[in-house]
Amino acid sequence: MTKPLFKVSTPVEAIKVLKDHLDIQKIIQKNREIVNIKDSLHRVLAEEIISPCNLPGFNRSTMDGYAIRAEDSFGASESLPSYLKIIGEIKMGSKSEFKINPGEAVKISTGAMLPEGANAVIMLEYTVLIDDTTVELRRSVAPWENIVREDEDLKAGEVLLKEGYRLRPQDIGILAGIGKINIKVFKRPRVAIISTGNEIIPAQDEPQIGEIRDINLYTLGACVEEADGIPIYKGIIKDEVDLLEQEIRKTIKKDKVEVVIVSGGSSMGTRDITLEVLNKLGKPGVLIHGVSVRPGKPTIIAVANDKPIFGLPGHPVSSMIIFNLFVRPLISWLQGGDYNYNSDNPKEVKAELTCNVVSDSGREDYVRVFMYKEKGKFYAEPVLGKSGLISTMVRASGLIKIGLNIEGIEKGSKVMVKLFN
């Protein structure tokens, strides 16, 4: 008897189905932790950060010069200078004890606190020291020139960073500036990776005829890290129902993972094993059985008792593309984000296609391209090869997407290249 063909879903449909069967908010509410800002780069905030104070907190000079009342410099020039009385000096890190009255000046260093009564700093270059107590001004300055106001950087009560924000180096700097050393962030999702296949052997072993080294375990592990998850490498399992079921159950319980990836076992020959196992692990079981994507059609998406499990194709190219379409967004959702691989991507570059690319209507095609620049223009050259050839991904700069109802793209067309990180 001929087995029925599995019904494929579009990527948009698959993502919706996955989201509908996961209580993301419930999951992320308990997936939070406190970390020191030294360990917070690229972490996602699980709290809103409000400034408790003004920054810098006092009026400070941005130049070496003299703190003065701006009004005392009005009209000053090289031909008609103004003269002020020097009443002291303020160095950086010292508290100002001076009060400036009309006709007075205080020598000041860059970063030092402005004395009371001063509202400007004139640079040393525009002054001449006449004697120990007299300075000549050779130009005028505007009020608050060469000064950072006490709340110019930050105001107390100002919202600095919102929950769900991914921290950059400069963000960590501003946290330090307000004294926020420990912050609440979302935990990095733990993602288990299980390779399947009787022909797969560890990467360090020498393959015999018919055997191949495990590429996907390491490729997917790196993809998880790149997506700010924590890869849990579980090794290789033979194509046997009991062995695969035991390994997944043990992994979920012992390793306390949020996501499981089964690499391989989604093709026609071994798909039934993966389907059987994923339907036995918990409700609702298999949600998606095939997606309208090339390469990557034989993809399986399941949820077992709130644990998302993916059956990814064994071919390395297919595996990476499907990871980016479904697993990467999930890792983002579990950290409070709303990332979608098919949404606008800041790592996209417009380029001109160097040759015709054929596609079948009814599926999304992801074509590997090498991008180069010539005479000020970017060009995208397709990297041809089967989905089992990892070298095509190595040679490629990124991917172009051909939509569901588009039958190819002509040479010379403008395309958006989704760049690899």
Image (tube, helix red, strand yellow):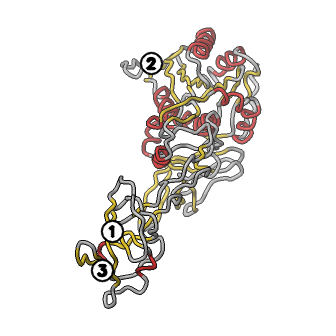
How many other residues sit within 10 Å of disc 2, few (<14), some (14-19) or many (≥20)?
many
The amino acid sitting under disc 1 is Ile
Which label belongs to residue 299?
A: none
Direction from residue 108 to residue 225 in the image, left or right? right
Q: Is residue 193 above or below residue 79?
A: above
Q: Element under label 3?
A: strand
Relative image position of residue 171 (x, y in whole percent): 50, 47
How many other residues sit within 10 Å of disc 3, few (<14), some (14-19) or many (≥20)?
many
Tell me the CA gap for discs 2 and 3: 82 Å
Q: Is residue 420 at least partly visible in the picture?
A: no
Cβ atoms under marks 2 and 3 closer than 8 Å: no
Location of the N terminus by quadrant is top right
In this view, the residue in front, 284 or 107, is 107
Which label belongs to residue 201?
A: 2
**In the rendered image, which quarter is residue 128 located in?**
bottom left
Q: Is residue 256 above or below residue 75?
A: above
Cβ atoms under marks 1 and 3 closer than 8 Å: no
The amino acid sitting under disc 2 is Ile
The amino acid sitting under disc 3 is Glu
In this view, the residue in front, 145 or 224, is 145
Give the mark, 2 or 3, whose residue is nearer the N terminus.
3
**Residue displayed at 59% across by 44% down:** 49
Give the mark, 1 or 3, whose residue is nearer the N terminus.
1
Q: Residue at label 1?
A: 87
Relative image position of residue 233 (x, y in whole percent): 49, 21
**Residue displayed at 65% across by 24% down:** 309
Tell me the CA gap for discs 2 and 1: 81 Å
Relative image position of residue 175 (x, y in whole percent): 50, 44
How many other residues sit within 10 Å of disc 1, few (<14), some (14-19) or many (≥20)?
some
Q: Residue at label 3?
A: 136
